[in-house]
């Protein structure tokens, strides 16, 4: 008779699964709460203590850590010596192991989780059994995810769990236990000094753990990376926070490339920051056109107008359902688009793009999620930082010049500041009327970024006179300010914080422009 050992923290679907196993003649062995649940459901279940001949002890800390359990999992059926050892000691084989672990992540996510609570939610017997069963995958099917119950049952009904399935399940087990150990490591090595004494208190945590573990799952291989001679793949984290790009659903188009995904993320993160209907066009990770409007169609038309040349082959993101009118407008511009992103794409809009199968259409569900950390790889190491989630509110602005911005100028300044946050440093952004007029990005000199922004505005036939200007960091000298005023800026938003702030403020007063400080820098290297 096939024996299944079931011990689960997540009880989802376990009674139904166990009932189906029993109907197939599988003997059910279980522990603690799982055993009681199955017995209450009318199922015949053998307690682990009865199988091992040893009672649970130490408040349940020791129940499955026994040779009769691990021998039944680890014995190789193709080795006579192993089977003889089992027979000598009266150990029965276990063919199916169904285990999931104590909810450590859920426990430590609670604001009131004490150190004692955290420690007690570290599973010992569960990982040991999982590793034993997965190591012996050729003879044991190990299930850790309720999502696999149905497929395992289907194969059992057909004659047994296939070898390929058992191997796949074993891979899943080792990935899971690795992630589980990583979570424990991240938690414990982030505890502040003195946490060992905080038995019944919520311990203080450092913002970054002493040892950082991160697990991602590959979702696709790519033809190449940034360049054809580089190999690449995309990995997704789990669980995935709502509203992040990695949760995309692709409606049509070729597989996303390495650069597609990088640029799409820049566009999506930028467009999410706007409350009004907005469009963001990104090229090479920089916004080349951003606008808000009464409708998406208006927002797109304004964004495209900023820099039609750079928009060619770009990524276009919207923060509302993409409608037919906007889709038609994109077609009228004959713009070559790599990727279109929106929270939803209306059927009529999909139909507009259906003949253009090379255009990738992505739906990304909205949400307020954010990455826990931003990472940057360097030789032999990795930089970690918290994400830049700061969005400056109107009340936080400080007017530093004699001239104060008008209400309309304040709107343009706040708009420009949101855009500048997503432009590579040194960033200079001219805006007006809810749209970008000129964007200068990624230059070693802020003055050069300003000149590039002016050139782009001129190429697009856009006037900078009376515009609002955002700089992602302070002006270290007045010469940078003079350049943007010469180009037409009538009001300026910048972080402040330079040793020469007074000199720059005096220059603004001399030139008759309004200037506000945010107190927040947005370097984006």
Image (tube, rainbow, N blue to C red):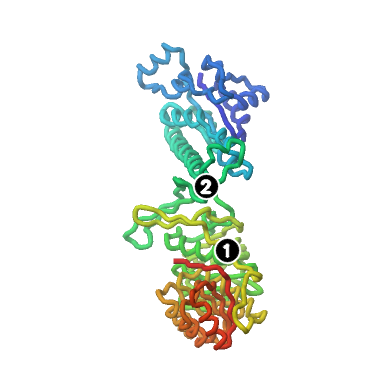
Identify the residue at horizontal 63%, vertical 74% (top origin).
Answer: 293
Q: Is residue 23 visible?
A: no
Spot occupied by residue 249 in the image (x, y as percentages of width and height): 54, 56
Q: Residue furthest top?
A: 88
Q: Which of marks 1 and 2 precedes in the sequence?
A: 2
Q: Is residue 130 visible?
A: yes
Q: CA distance from mark 2 to mark 1?
A: 25 Å
Identify the residue at horizontal 43%, vertical 56% (top origin).
Answer: 383
Residue holding disc 2: 238
Is label 2 or label 1 in front?
1
Identify the residue at horizontal 55%, vertical 81% (top origin).
Answer: 505
- Does 146 appear above or below 234? above
Near mark 2 (Cα within 10 A), the count class, few <14, some 14-19 or many ≥20, is few
- Does 401 appear above or below 107? below
| Element class at badge 1 | loop
Q: Looking at the image, which is closer to me, 401 or 238?
A: 401
Spot occupied by residue 403 in the image (x, y as percentages of width and height): 62, 84
- Does 192 appear above or below 309? above
Spot occupied by residue 199 in the image (x, y as percentages of width and height): 58, 36
């Amino acid at each position: 008779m096939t024996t299944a050992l079931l011990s689960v923290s997540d009880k989802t679907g376990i009674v139904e699964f166990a009932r189906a196993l029993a109907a197939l003649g599988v003997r059910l062995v279980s522990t603690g709460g799982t055993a009681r649940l199955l017995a209450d459901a009318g199922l015949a279940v053998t307690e682990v203590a009865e199988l091992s001949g040893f009672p649970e002890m130490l408040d349940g800390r020791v129940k499955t850590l026994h040779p009769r359990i691990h021998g039944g999992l680890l014995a190789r059926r193709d080795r006579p010596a192993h089977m003889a050892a089992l027979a000598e000691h009266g150990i029965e084989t276990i063919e199916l192991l169904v285990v999931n672990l104590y909810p450590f992540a859920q426990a430590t996510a609670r604001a009131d989780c004490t150190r004692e609570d955290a420690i007690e939610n570290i599973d010992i017997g569960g990982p040991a059994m999982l590793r034993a069963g997965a190591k012996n995958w050729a003879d044991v099917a190990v299930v850790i995810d309720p999502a696999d119950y149905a497929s395992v049952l289907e194969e059992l009904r057909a004659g047994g769990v296939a070898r390929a399935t058992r191997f796949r399940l074993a891979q899943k087990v080792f990935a899971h236990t690795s992630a589980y150990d990583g979570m424990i490591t991240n938690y414990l090595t982030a505890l502040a000094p003195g946490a060992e004494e905080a038995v019944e208190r919520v311990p203080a945590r450092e913002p970054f753990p002493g040892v950082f573990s991160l697990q991602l799952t590959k979702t696709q291989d790519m033809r190449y990376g940034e360049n054809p001679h580089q190999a690449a793949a995309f990995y997704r984290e789990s669980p995935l926070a709502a509203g992040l790009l990695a949760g995309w659903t692709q409606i049509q188009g070729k597989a996303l490339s390495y650069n597609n995904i990088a640029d799409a993320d820049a566009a999506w993160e930028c467009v999410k920051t706007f409350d009004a209907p907005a469009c963001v066009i990104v090229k090479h990770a920089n916004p080349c056109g951003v606008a808000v409007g009464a409708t998406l169609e208006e927002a797109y038309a304004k964004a495209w107008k900023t820099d039609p040349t750079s928009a060619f082959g770009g990524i276009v993101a919207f923060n509302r359902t993409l409608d037919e009118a906007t889709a038609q407008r994109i077609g009228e511009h004959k713009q070559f688009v790599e990727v279109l992103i929106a929270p939803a794409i209306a059927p009529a809009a999909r139909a507009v793009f259906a003949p253009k199968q090379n255009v990738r259409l992505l739906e990304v569900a909205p949400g307020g999620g954010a990455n826990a950390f931003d990472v940057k790889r360097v030789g032999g190491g990795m930089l970690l930082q918290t994400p830049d989630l700061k969005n400056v509110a109107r009340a936080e602005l400080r007017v530093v010049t004699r001239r104060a911005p008008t209400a309309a100028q304040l709107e343009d300044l706040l708009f420009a500041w949101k855009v500048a946050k997503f432009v590579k440093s040194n960033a200079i952004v001219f805006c007006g009327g809810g749209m970008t007029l000129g964007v200068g990005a990624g230059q070693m000199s802020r003055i050069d970024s300003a000149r590039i922004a002016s050139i782009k505005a001129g190429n697009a036939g856009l006037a900078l006179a009376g515009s609002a200007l955002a700089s992602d960091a302070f002006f270290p000298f007045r010469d940078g300010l003079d350049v943007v005023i010469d180009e037409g800026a009538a009001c300026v938003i910048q972080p402040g914080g330079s040793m020469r702030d007074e000199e720059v403020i005096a220059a603004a007063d001399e030139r008759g422009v309004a200037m506000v400080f945010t107190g927040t820098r947005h370097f984006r290297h």
